Image (spheres, rainbow, N blue to C red):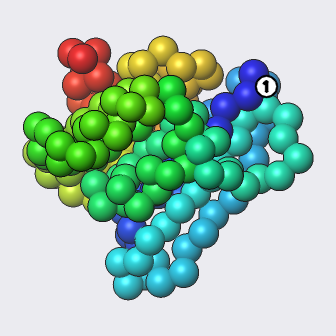
């Protein structure tokens, strides 16, 4: 199995935690996984990109038009990182909008890119933990049937990786995201 996932967002939105959960979930399933992070001014709301590769790769980097999946924790970071998504790839975008700009929709169609939109911020806010939209997006991702990222596998990693007092709330938000994905 080979899979390249690009996680993109801004500082403080859980991009690095999400990519760690993805990497550790793959490792727990017996797969080889690596990650590479890029975060400069992230503490001031700057861009954060984390690259997760599952399988045998010589480099932890993801080149232009090579990512199978783009998890965009901010809509603006979806636009900025779209060039890394390969033709036929898939993007999950954290947005409350029903539609993206026409020219973007046209480009996605031309490149045969499947787009999934989820209001992760809305889910996290409704559940009382606004900074956990990353977990809602992972829940949505788990519903898509991409191995090893089943709901059970990611849930196990969330339990192992998050702090005790946040585990229950994170699992609640994860499940709400998964339910949104099942409805698509």
Quadrant position of the N terminus in the picture: top right
Left or right side of 62 for 56: right
- At x 41% / y 61%, what residue is drawn? 80
Left or right side of 183 for 108: right
Could you say where residue 179 lies in the image, as x and y percent from the top left?
25, 21
Q: Pointer 1: residues within 10 angstroms few (<14), some, or many (20+)?
A: few
* Res 100 quadrant in image: top left
Residue behind mark 1: 30
Quadrant position of the C terminus in the picture: top left
In the rendered image of this protein, does residue 18 appear above or below residue 31?
Answer: below
Could you say where residue 132 lies in the image, as x and y percent from the top left?
31, 52
Provide the secondary structure element on which disc 1 rests.
loop
Could you say where residue 60 lies in the image, as x and y percent from the top left?
77, 53
Q: Give 115 or 149, whichever is nearer the viewer.
A: 115
Residue 84 appears anywhere in the view: yes
Q: Give 10 or 122, whichever is nearer the viewer.
A: 10
Residue 152 appears anywhere in the view: no
Q: Give 89 or 52, whichever is nearer the viewer.
A: 89
């Amino acid at each position: 199995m080979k899979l390249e996932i690009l996680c993109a967002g801004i500082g403080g939105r859980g991009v690095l935690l999400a990519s760690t959960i993805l990497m550790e979930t793959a490792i727990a399933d017996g797969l080889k996984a690596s990650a590479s992070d890029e975060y400069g001014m992230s503490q001031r709301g700057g861009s954060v990109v984390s690259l997760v590769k599952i399988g045998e790769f010589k480099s932890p980097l993801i080149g232009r038009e090579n990512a199978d999946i783009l998890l965009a924790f901010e809509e603006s970071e979806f636009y900025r990182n779209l060039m890394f998504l390969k033709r036929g790839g898939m993007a999950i975008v954290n947005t409350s909008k029903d539609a993206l700009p026409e020219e973007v929709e046209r480009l996605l169609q031309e490149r045969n890119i499947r787009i999934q939109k989820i209001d992760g911020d809305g889910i996290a806010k409704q559940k009382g933990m606004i900074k956990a939209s990353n977990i809602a997006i992972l829940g949505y991702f788990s519903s898509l049937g991409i191995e090893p990222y089943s709901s059970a596998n990611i849930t196990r990693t969330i339990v192992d990786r998050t702090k005790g007092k946040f585990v229950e709330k994170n699992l609640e938000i994860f499940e709400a995201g998964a339910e949104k994905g099942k409805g698509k």
